[in-house]
Image (tube, helix red, strand yellow):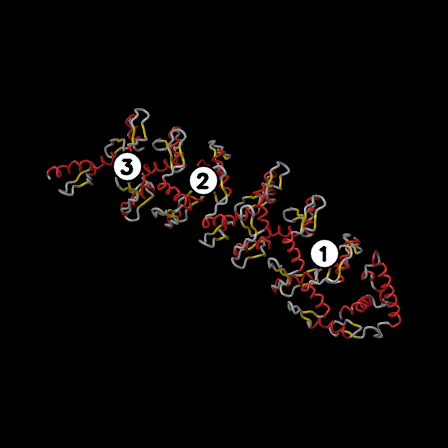
């Protein structure tokens, strides 16, 4: 122990050197130091006897320096040419000069780290060997260095002899006091040569420099996680051991670090000493204040090297990086679900336990997350401190403001690895990925139906409970979803905030706009496995599949009629109530559905927005256009199992099947006449009412059916579209052609 043997002599030389740094007249050795006892804070308690010996040594040393003096070079005649520092021995000077030359001749065989002295190397090697030769007699704690043991022993005595003159904070070690005083002075003497960052302690600088080198010399034997500092490794190892040595005296909560305990204790005291100068919000921890200030500055210093996404905290970046690796080391023992972060697992487990540890003081509402409680409190205060500079809209949470601002910027930072679909929030991306995986983790206890989102499950459960918490103030209509209410209110206001950039068509919902835009792109990503038909919307595919399965999940409680969609059921239910709230301003005709009114109005305007790409034929309804396209393709995908006849439309197949079954589901209320189609019933009712809504513009004659009007108009135009293949004679009606063809069949 060559270096350790030199320590007593080195200590004896330190004090007179510090005295020399003072005034020129004060060269009396130890007495020249402002507080020479601070070098040996052991003149009390169990170290009293040791202090007496040390005091005797320094008294003799004091006499010796007075008699010999320093100016004549009696003690320190070896001085450094770089900084002028002097030493009693030449070997001490050589060791000191390595500070200037950067020489480190002693290197570790295990990790390659180098040192200026062999003593420092020996101390370092204890990190690898695990040797801790200095142990505390009271608690058994072991240390690699004697100085660390002495500092530790002050914990048992509770003595803190060094206090700050400005704030009164007390410390057990002089160095701790010096580091503390830099808080008041703002001094940061240690700066990084690469980035200029300054620090109050040398150890903090060394730890910071590892960021640039990427060196993480301390690794966990259990999971392989690497760290830049040994203390971080020790804290990490408590995750595996479950050790939480710091506990709160008031509530018993335990923590892995003392800093976490201190932050927790502020909950009981309610102290929040750190406040934001811009908005006045207060915080219990300075680090939380710094992160909060980034909301105002917009600073996001942590960015992902793979996708460029930026974050306000290092923790958020680390969690984000796991989305690229897919690593999820934390799993739920009950359901097997895996998570990338331990905190996410803890929150998930509350679903199984039902635990809601955070409750509101005003209304008693309980929450699984503190974040949710803080957001809930804004309900009582009405506070919305975050506002959009572009449109002025205010928000109670900064995250909501960030998401809102993406509407203006068009930013979609979260993209799917499989299909490259982009989203404004990570939650939407996670939900979208379930489309590829087919995962539906949320299920209804009553009917067993599963959902990919918890919100979808909640809305679904209202079907069983009948709950409709959202209602319209104008017409009193109630809804099970808030979005449905907002969309409904646009009927009263006429607002259509979503417009197509290509054709200018406006819509009340963004989803309607997206579906419309597929008309321009022609994209149909959803296909039926049975018949191969493709669709632009997944919901349309689901409804189509009911044609093959025959499923009709929506039934009328009054008459038992079943339907494939809830929309068809609602329209049908209006036939029982007779309620028709939508009326045409031109002819006064009323309708039970707004879509029916829009289609009707096209009769007056002559608008035909749907046109065939091949022949240019135009139609008032998209449904009519799709049926027309079968003329060009010749496709008839629907066929009758009894007679084999094929049809281009499923409705025509249903009507045809009634010939075989004899079913006539539509009956007249006045005379009891039954019909196979609703259209025939509506036409029949005009016999009783005398209504003839179709009239000829040339002669004024009226008709009860549009088909009768078309046949009549051929009298004026002279059109005869039906012709006999045998003799070439033409007719204005198909019935006349059929009767004519009997002449040829009778002669043959």
Neighbour class for label 1 at 10 Å: few (<14), some, many (≥20)?
few
Neighbour class for label 2 at 10 Å: few (<14), some, many (≥20)?
some
| Among numbered discs 3 and 2, the one appearing first in the sequence | 2
Q: Disc 3 marks which residue?
A: 656
Neighbour class for label 3 at 10 Å: few (<14), some, many (≥20)?
some
Q: Disc 1 marks which residue?
A: 183
417 relative to 527 in the view: left or right: right
| C-alpha distance separating marks 3 and 1 | 90 Å
Which of the 4 image quarters holds residue 2?
Answer: bottom right
Relative to 341, say whether 32 is above or below: below
Relative to 3, say whether 262 is above or below: above
| CB contact under 8 Å: marks 2 and 1 | no
Say which of marks 2 and 1 sits in front. Answer: 1
Q: Disc 2 marks which residue?
A: 495
Whether residue 257 is visible = yes
Q: Tell me where residue 549 appears, x and y as whole percent.
A: 37, 41
Describe the element under mark 2 as helix, strand or loop. loop
Describe the element under mark 3 as helix, strand or loop. helix
| C-alpha distance separating marks 2 and 1 | 58 Å
């Amino acid at each position: 122990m060559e270096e350790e043997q030199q320590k007593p002599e080195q200590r004896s030389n330190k004090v007179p050197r510090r005295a020399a740094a003072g005034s020129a007249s004060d060269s009396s050795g130890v007495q020249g130091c402002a507080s020479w006892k601070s070098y040996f804070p052991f003149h009390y308690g169990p170290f009293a006897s040791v202090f007496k010996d040390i005091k005797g040594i320094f008294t003799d040393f004091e006499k010796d320096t007075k008699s010999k003096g320093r100016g004549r070079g009696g003690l320190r005649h070896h001085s450094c040419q770089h900084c002028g520092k002097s030493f009693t021995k030449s070997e001490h000077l050589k060791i000191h000069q390595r500070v200037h030359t950067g020489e480190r001749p002693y290197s570790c065989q295990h990790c390659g780290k180098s040192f200026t002295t062999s003593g420092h190397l020996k101390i370092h090697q204890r990190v690898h060997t695990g040797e801790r030769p200095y142990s505390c007699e009271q608690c058994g704690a072991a240390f690699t260095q004697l100085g660390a043991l002495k500092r530790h022993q002050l914990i048992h005595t509770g003595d803190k002899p060094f206090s700050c003159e400005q704030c009164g904070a007390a410390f057990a070690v002089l160095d701790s006091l010096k580091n503390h005083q830099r808080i008041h002075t703002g001094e940061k003497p240690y700066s990084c040569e690469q980035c200029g960052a300054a620090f109050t302690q040398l150890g903090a600088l060394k730890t910071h420099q590892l960021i640039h080198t990427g060196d993480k010399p301390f690794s966990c034997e259990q999971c392989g996680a690497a760290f830049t500092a040994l203390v971080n490794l020790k804290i990490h190892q408590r995750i595996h051991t479950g050790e939480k040595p710091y506990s709160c005296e008031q509530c018993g909560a335990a923590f892995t670090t003392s800093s976490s305990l201190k932050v927790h204790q502020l909950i009981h005291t309610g102290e929040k000493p750190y406040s934001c100068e811009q908005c006045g919000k207060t915080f219990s921890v300075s680090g939380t204040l710094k992160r909060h200030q980034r909301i105002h500055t917009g600073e996001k210093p942590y960015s992902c090297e793979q996708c460029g996404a930026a974050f306000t905290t290092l923790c958020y970046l680390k969690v984000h990086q796991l989305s690229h690796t897919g690593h999820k080391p934390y799993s739920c023992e009950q359901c097997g679900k895996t998570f990338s972060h331990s905190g996410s697992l803890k929150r998930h487990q509350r679903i199984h336990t039902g635990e809601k540890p955070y409750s509101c003081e005003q209304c008693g509402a309980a929450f699984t997350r503190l974040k949710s409680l803080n957001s809930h409190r804004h309900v009582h205060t009405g506070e919305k401190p975050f506002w959009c500079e572009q449109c002025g809209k205010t928000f109670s949470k900064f995250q909501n403001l960030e998401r809102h601002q993406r509407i203006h910027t068009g930013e979609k930072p979260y993209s799917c690895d499989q299909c490259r679909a982009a989203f404004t929030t990570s939650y939407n991306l996670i939900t979208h990925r379930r489309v590829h995986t087919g995962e539906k983790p949320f299920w209804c206890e009553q009917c067993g139906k599963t959902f990919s989102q918890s919100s979808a499950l909640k809305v679904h459960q209202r079907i069983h409970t009948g709950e409709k918490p959202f209602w319209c103030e104008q017409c009193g209509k109630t809804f099970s979803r808030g979005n449905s209410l907002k969309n409904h209110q646009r009927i009263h206001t006429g607002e259509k905030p979503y417009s197509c950039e290509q054709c200018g068509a406006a819509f009340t919902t963004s989803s309607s706009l997206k579906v419309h835009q597929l008309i321009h792109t022609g994209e149909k990503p959803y296909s039926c496995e049975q018949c191969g038909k493709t669709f632009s919307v997944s919901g349309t595919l689901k409804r189509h599949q009911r044609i093959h399965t025959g499923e009709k999940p929506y039934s009328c409680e009054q008459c038992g009629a079943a339907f494939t969609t809830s929309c068809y059921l609602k329209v049908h239910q209006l036939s029982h109530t007779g309620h028709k709230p939508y009326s045409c301003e031109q002819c006064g005709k009323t309708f039970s559905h707004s879509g029916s009114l829009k289609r009707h109005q096209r009769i007056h305007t002559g608008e035909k927005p749907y046109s065939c790409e091949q022949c240019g034929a135009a139609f008032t309804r998209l449904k009519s256009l799709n049926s027309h396209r079968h003329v060009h393709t010749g496709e008839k995908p629907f066929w009758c199992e009894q007679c084999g006849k094929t049809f281009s439309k499923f409705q025509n197949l249903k009507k045809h099947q009634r010939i075989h079954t004899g079913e006539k589901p539509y009956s007249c209320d006045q005379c009891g006449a039954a019909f196979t189609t609703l259209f025939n019933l509506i036409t029949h009712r005009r016999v009783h009412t005398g209504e003839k809504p179709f009239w000829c513009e040339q002669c004024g004659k009226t008709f009860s059916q549009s088909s009768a009007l078309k046949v009549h108009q051929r009298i004026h135009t002279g059109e005869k579209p039906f012709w006999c293949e045998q003799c070439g004679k033409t007719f204005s009606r198909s019935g006349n052609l059929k009767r004519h063809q009997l002449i040829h069949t009778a002669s043959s």
